[in-house]
Image: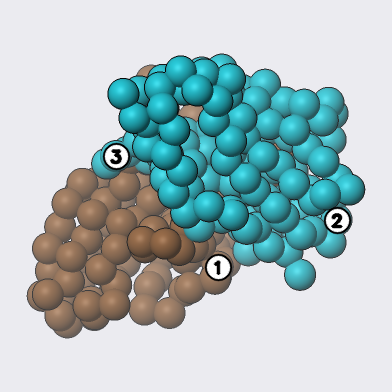
Amino acid sequence: NAGVTQTPKFQVLKTGQSMTLQCAQDMNHNSMYWYRQDPGMGLRLIYYSASEGTTDKGEVPNGYNVSRLNKREFSLRLESAAPSQTSVYFCASSPRVREGHQPQHFGDGTRLSIL
Amino acid sequence: AQSVTQLDSHVSVSEGTPVLLRCNYSSSYSPSLFWYVQHPNKGLQLLLKYTSAATLVKGINGFEAEFKKSETSFHLTKPSAHMSDAAEYFCVVIDTGYSSASKIIFGSGTRLSIRP
């Protein structure tokens, strides 16, 4: 039972390069999320997808784009990476975003460094 | 406005002694509250959740938390710390009246260290 799988686990980019972080879940969840984690700041929501075919901005969306490819997969794209985007990125899923009782299930993260 | 405050950025206890990690929240609606644990280089794992049923919530690995509405607190406790409890702990609040995921708020985390 894989849960939430993120690829890659580590990545180093140069400023201005682009890349896509991949996320897939096998729990048949409707909602998926992308967070970034920076020291002393907890997790901040970048984008989320309440259901297949929809995406919405979170707290810190600037510099990112997302695609909900299908119910299982939700990707995060950095079009032109900046050093301020150096962070650990987490993907999460939950049964349904509009039911507040539902906890989220997290992947193990992608550690991204922008030089 | 909705917010979560974890009152200690770092807590250090001796193995076998009690653990207390403090969390205060503010919420416009009836909140759902969660505690997650994060071990090094891992994602977050759910410890326990409060969803307006019993105010004392029991979670995994011997942890529990008490929802106190009058104090707007949701502190995490464990009677006896184990070395494997060393990790980062996050308190999370979700307003059950919310209509977007932007209402999911994470605390800044508390790092728990266990002394032998």
Q: Colour of chain A?
A: brown
Q: Chain of mark 3?
A: B
Could you confirm whether marks 1 and 2 are on the same chain? no
Quarter of the picture holding the N terminus of chain B: bottom right
Chain coloured cyan here: B
- The residue drawn where x is 34% and y is 56% is A89
Could you confirm whether marks 1 and 3 are on the same chain? no
Q: Are marks 1 and 2 in contact (CB under 8 Å)?
A: no
Q: Is residue A8 left or right of residue A28?
A: left
Amino acid type of the residue tagged 1 in the rendering:
Gly
Q: Quadrant of residue A12?
A: bottom left
Q: Chain of mark 1?
A: A
Which label was assigned to residue B40? 3
Q: Secondary structure at mark 2?
A: loop
Which label was assigned to residue A11? none
* Circle 1 residues within 10 Å: few <14, some 14–19, many ≥20: many
Amino acid type of the residue tagged 2 in the rendering:
Tyr
Residue, disc 2:
B29
- The residue drawn where x is 17% and y is 51% is A10
Residue A96 in the image: above or below residue A89: above
**Residue A72, x across and y down, in percent:** 44, 41
Q: Is residue B11 left or right of residue B58?
A: left
**Disc 1 from disc 3: Cα separation:** 26 Å
Look at discs 1 and 3 and give the one toward the viewer.
3
Q: Secondary structure at mark 3?
A: loop
Q: Which of B113/A27 is in front?
A: B113
How many marks the image carries: the answer is 3
- The residue drawn where x is 26% and y is 51% is A110
Q: Secondary structure at mark 1?
A: loop
Residue, disc 1:
A58
**Residue A61, x across and y down, in percent:** 46, 74
